[in-house]
Amino acid sequence: MRMKKCTGKRSLTFLFAAAYMMSYLTRINFGAVISEMVSKTGFSQSMLSLSLTGSFITYGVGQIISGVLGDLVSPKKLVTIGFSTTVVMNFAIPFCPTPYYMLAVWCLNGFAQSLMWPPMVKIMTAYLTEEEYKASVTKVSWGSSFGTILVYLLTPLLITLTGWRWVFFTSAIGGGVMLAVWILLSPDAQVKKENKEKIASVSGAYSTLFSPLMLGVMAAIIFQGILRDGVTTWMPSYLAQTYDLSNSVSILTGVIMPIFGIVCYQIAGGLYVKRLPNPLSCGGVLALAGSFSALGLYLSTGTNPFLSVLFTAVLIGCMHGVNLMLVCMIPPYFKRFGNVSAASGIINSCTYVGSAVSTYGVALISEQAGWSITLFLWFLCAASATLLCFTCARGFRKKFML
């Protein structure tokens, strides 16, 4: 008997949240286990971080490719290809004998992961109204937080019982299960021939996307990416090195971060819908809160691990809220141009420009200059994102909301 596809608001939201969660499980596991890999393999922190940097680069470039393809070919097939490839890459990484093999495998994984989010946005905008999309995309974004919680709960347990390699094996198995569910239940958003011709004929779409206004927005997203992924990746190493905690304990504290992320998603969504309908204004408020948290982290470092975890959690949570506003809420404004997926891919790729810079940059700066300088740079990034959001808010309202 043929299974019914998920097209209702609730079922579609649940399916996409689960898929997004599993994409995180198979993508951020490397960052979660890197401190243990440094201890067990003898490879340096900066050498292993090349794999993370490479994956962020291929993920960012792939977002652009995936976004354009999502407007022209089957979005469901793109996600299927992405999940299939990431399962294979997660199985392969434990067998890599050197950091350079890991770099190649994880770069492929980054590209595979990029085939997921823009097509998902395309499908959601096809089946949901504007108001339904705003509510659903907030809940779908929870998937990233639940995926992070799952990673940071499983990683210490698997390290203790079986070793770091089983973190990747377990992730691959989970990704394989999600792949089967996706194939069976996900609907598709068909792109008709006339829509392709419309996309090709709209000259104003990409000029708007790359206007000075949107370039300012993209710069804010880059700073957000530096903080969201850079802080998440290196927080366990910062805690272990600053407070002499074990790798397992430091990794376990990562569970707190996505909990704050879920809270901030809800706060951001409620603030956007009820108080600040301009995503730039809403993002600016959240970035400002993140700036205060980053400053608190810098000023309190080395004094108390609880305070460091708290300030870090609030900072990361705020950046998740900024990501929700700028990466998830802005692309639907391009629906009238017929290139929602392309806009989503290009805008989201900016996050991973920041991620790539921070993943290798944090390792290098923390090794050469120490964590205090690194934390102050995090504060400057948060302050820059705040300034850019508020600066661009008025122009965005005039261009897209009037």
Image (tube, helix red, strand yellow):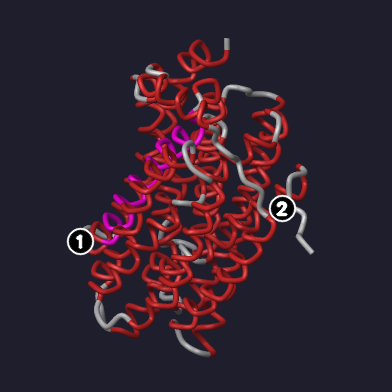
Q: Residue drawn 67% across and 61% down?
A: 184
Tell me: residue 93, above or below residue 242.
below
Secondary structure found at label 2: helix
Residue 166, percent from left and from top: 49, 83
Residue 202, percent from left and from top: 42, 19
Tell me: residue 44, above or below residue 117.
below
Tell me: residue 257, above or below residue 73.
below
CA neighbours of label 1 inside 10 A, class few (<14), some (14 to 19), many (20+): few
Residue type at mark 1? Gln
Q: Magenta stretch?
A: 339-363
In this rendered view, identify the residue nearer to me: 267 or 113: 113
The nearer-to-camera label among 1 and 2 is 2
Q: Is residue 327 left or right of residue 189?
A: left
Identify the residue under disc 1: 368
Number of numbered discs overlaid on the protein picture: 2
How far is the residue under mark 1 from the one under mark 2?
Answer: 44 Å
In this rendered view, identify the residue nearer to me: 104 or 189: 189
Mark number, residue 14: 2
